[in-house]
Amino acid sequence: MNIDKDQYKVRKEPYYQAQGNEVALFEAAYRNRLPVMVKGPTGCGKSRFVEHMAWKLGKPLITVACNEDMTASDLVGRYLLEANGTRWLDGPLTTAARIGAICYLDEIVEARQDTTVVIHPLTDHRRTLPLDKKGELIEAHPDFQLVISYNPGYQSLLKDLKQSTKQRFTAFDFDYPDAALETTILARETGLDEALAGKLVKIGQTARNLKGHGLDEGISTRLLVYAATLIKDGVNPVEACQMSLVRPITDDADIRETLDHAIDTTFA
Amino acid sequence: MTETEYQHPLMKAYWAQLDTRFKQVENVFEDVMAEALAVLSREELPHYLEAARLLGKLGRGVEPMLVFLEEWPGVVSALGKEATLPDVMAFVMKMQKSPNGKAIAPFIQTLAPVARRLHTREQLQHYLQIAADLMARTTGSIHGHHTTFPSPGLPLFFEQAPRLLDQLSLAGVKNWVEYGIRNYPNHPERQEEYFALKSADSRAVMQRERHGVLFVDVERKLDLYLRGLWADAEQLVPYSTAFDEIRKPIPYYDKLGMRIPDVYDDFTPAPTRTPGVISGLDRYRATLAHMVGHRRWTTAQIADNWSPFQRMAVEFFEDCRVETLLCRDYPGLRRIFLALHPQPVEGACDPETTSCLRHRLAMLSRALLDPEHGYRDALLNEFVGRFHAALADGPASSPAMAELALSYVARSRRPSDQFAKVWFDDTVIDYRDDNRHMWQFIEDSDDEDFFDDPDKSKKKEAEVQALPPRHYPEWDYHSQTYRPDWVSLYEHLHPKGRGSDIDRLLQKHDALAKRLKRILDLLKPQDKVRIRYQEEGSELDLDVAIRSLIDFKGGATPDPRINMNHRTSGRNIAVSLLLDLSESLNEKVAGSEQTILELSQEAVTLLAWAVERLGDPFAIAGFHSNTRHDVRFMHIKGYGEGFSDDVKSRLAAMEAGWSTRMGAALRHAAHYLKARPADKKLLLVLTDGQPADVDTQDERLLIEDTRRAVRELDEQGIFTYCINLDPKADEYVSDIFGRQYTVIDNIQRLPEKLPELFLALTK
């Protein structure tokens, strides 16, 4: 089996602004090949962080976006039918274990709990992956590491990780960066000037204050970046904010009106 | 014959035309005529006098005539040149012919203030129509007597009319009157209370009909505004502005919350000022933002050594400081503040004759906020400069503002400030709170009320034993409106009895339970369902794969759908069972020794057992009512509870009594069901009769209300289903529940019917 490792490499440095000591801590975890869990609200930079670390460590990164309909064979692999019978096709997790990549399971709780159990043997001292349908036991490549992300906030009670899964990981707790840092991030990422970026951050915080009062999640850093990008492109700031910050996150007329008011008064 | 001799021949002619011998009229005639001549034209004057003469001849004493003479010029000046006199006189004659002659004087008495609020003749005609309608429908029919009774509400209505029109549009007045007529046609005392604006209903309906932005309508928005923009979660408490005519309350905040008016009309600034109407909502926001500013930046000052003037100046400076800081956060607020802030005209107040302190401070306040104030006063401009310098780097502080204010007062003081005549025009800034939080008095002063009953808080606590009532509206089909907060509903846990009785019931229906169990097992969610024949799937379906391969090798086109998938199928239904526990349940069922209540108990037991096995979240509650003031809602089983001994003992203690006010109970059950996260929500109602209550004579009323409630529930995504035990139910049940009902004629079979019905509904 010949897999092109390079296609999974992160070539260009993804911009990542550290909020604390997470880069060094991740490196330590990787040195010891400990599985890592990244927690935090949506759009706060979890995936960007993982990408950045893969680039920094120079390892291939295989990302799987988990969803409810995902089954174990979507991770591990399945048989396909061919002219001469069947052919086995590795799933992303298997590929990563073979080539020694960082396997990143994004939004792991979206997958059903019985599906996530297949990662267990890879996350403890065994570091193996049994392919029972194929009758093969894969020893994970020495470079292989498993990283999962999950958002403890917005999902329902039903969507939580099993204790037995949780206890296999070291974890980072992410949150939206503080105002000054977030302003820097917006400015760096999009080239918007700091003053305007600060106003966007302010609107973002307005929405974050409303979390739990009709909003499941505040405005994410990602959406703020979208808004900044639109403004940079010459869109009127008020409209850019309505389009990228308010309309996506709520259908509640009262909240929409409140946020629109915040935008109007901020950009007046 | 009067012996007065008027000097002026015209006057003499007028007096002759009036043709009256009332002494009281004579006393004021000259004054009245002077006023009338100023307003009325030559052509109108004879009509005026003729109308007055007529009123004098009605045989109702001097009052109508006197009042008319005095008030009519006011009406004419309010409505302009339009000929309204015939309309008014026609209405007076109508009253005169009915038993309502006594209402003529109040009618004319308030006509001028009413006219000032109505502006046009057309609107006045509407007003007369409303009054005529009120008169026609409330006159005479009291207790079935002969029609000689006057309308009890009519004179009171006329007395209240100016105030009503102040707060309501004409349409609102019409609704308000309509409500009073319909609800109190047979209670003269209640009707009087209503039209005198003394009863709670009357005030509530008036509140509902008010124009402007009502607090209740925007409460959530304001709450979000506070939280979102200002990260403040203070309680908002509205105060009424409708009934305090003389002393208009001002917003304030204290330990119990932020007090704001219950309604704000849209604010249209004077044409000379910044254009653009400020909506009621924005006025609320400005008020809240201002208070938030104080909460953030204001520190209390010790006020004992300052005079009231000094305190006032400090307040103005501090108000401007917090607003400046607020505008730094949200620059757009400045537009709203400036639009709401009065713009006093420089030099409008004459310091020689009037106390101009307020005027000066309002001007200063304007100048501090508005960079384009354009005032030329040197002192004012100096202090504006000092104010901005103080705030240039950082938020400054309350003491710094106090210092600035004191120095301003010292330099701008004038002897005339002490005058009793105070200049008030353009100095009231109504979005600002009363600043009570700013002052701290070391010694109790005598200009405030400082009494506090230490026992008060304790007494309150003792009173709160049960949950406070919840108020629900009731639908009035006559007017197609809701009666606001009409029903008081008290909820509590059902008392307990012996739970073992319920276990015995289950044993009794053992055979039935077994049969049910078989159905249940079929219904139980099958966790994994295999879906075959998929092109993409999680696993190879070997049977199909081999068949396809054979086809392929044999040269035929193979079926590409060789995979299979798994799907989990689950039930996600929340169920609430609402039991009618009214008196009629105590009747024995024909041909049986058991009462309907006992049979219901058995049925509910079986149903609860069945649902428990299915695992659907399930709640049981009973209700009955004793007039609209006391609807009782008793929880028997909550969604979170299992079918435990507690639940069984509550079920065992079920008792029947009182009446069936179903609408409120439905709304309350829905209140809980709505909050469940389930996909499907089912509300089962088990009842033995139509909605009825002792305080409602009109049968249709509660039926229509219940029907309305079912519709509301439907809008909230709740499926309501009625199980009716009344053999005659066909007459009304489909009116209420549409097609979502079953009538069980053979009540003895209820215990087996109910669970079966439930299973059929949720299959």
Image: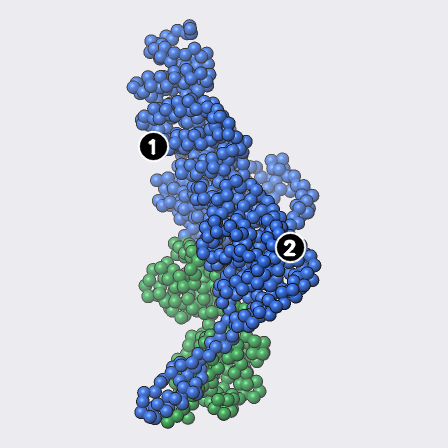
Chain colours: A green, B blue
Could you tell me if the residues under marks 2 and 1 are in contact, i.e. CB atoms within 8 Å? no
Q: Nearer the viewer, residue B579 or B291?
A: B579
Q: Residue A80: x percent and y percent? A: 40, 88
Q: Tell me the subunit letter for badge 2.
A: B
Give amino acid for label 2. Glu
Q: Distance between the residues labelled 2 and 1?
A: 70 Å
Mark 1: give few (<14), some (14-19) or many (20+) Cα within 10 Å.
Answer: few
- Residue denoted by label 2: B593
Q: What element carries label 2?
A: loop
Q: In which quarter of the image is residue A91?
A: bottom left
Q: Which residue lies furthest to the left in this view?
A: B43
The residue under the point 50% across, 89% down is A132
The residue under the point 62% across, 60% down is B602
Looking at the rendered image, the quarter that the C terminus of chain A falls into is bottom left
Residue A230 in the figure: left or right of residue B409: left
Give amino acid for label 1. Glu
Residue A67 in the figure: left or right of residue B498: left
- Residue denoted by label 1: B122
Q: Tell me the subunit letter for badge 1.
A: B
- Tell me if I can see residue B164 in this picture: yes
The residue under the point 68% across, 56% down is B496
Q: Which of marks 2 and 1 is in front?
A: 2
Q: Residue B608: x percent and y percent? A: 59, 63
Q: Nearer the viewer, residue A117 or A227?
A: A117
Q: Residue A197: x percent and y percent? A: 41, 63
Residue B741, compared with residue B436, is above or below; it is below
Dot 2 or dot 1, earlier in sequence: 1
Q: Is mark 1 on a helix, strand or loop?
A: helix
Q: Residue B287: x percent and y percent? A: 48, 47
How many marks the image carries: the answer is: 2
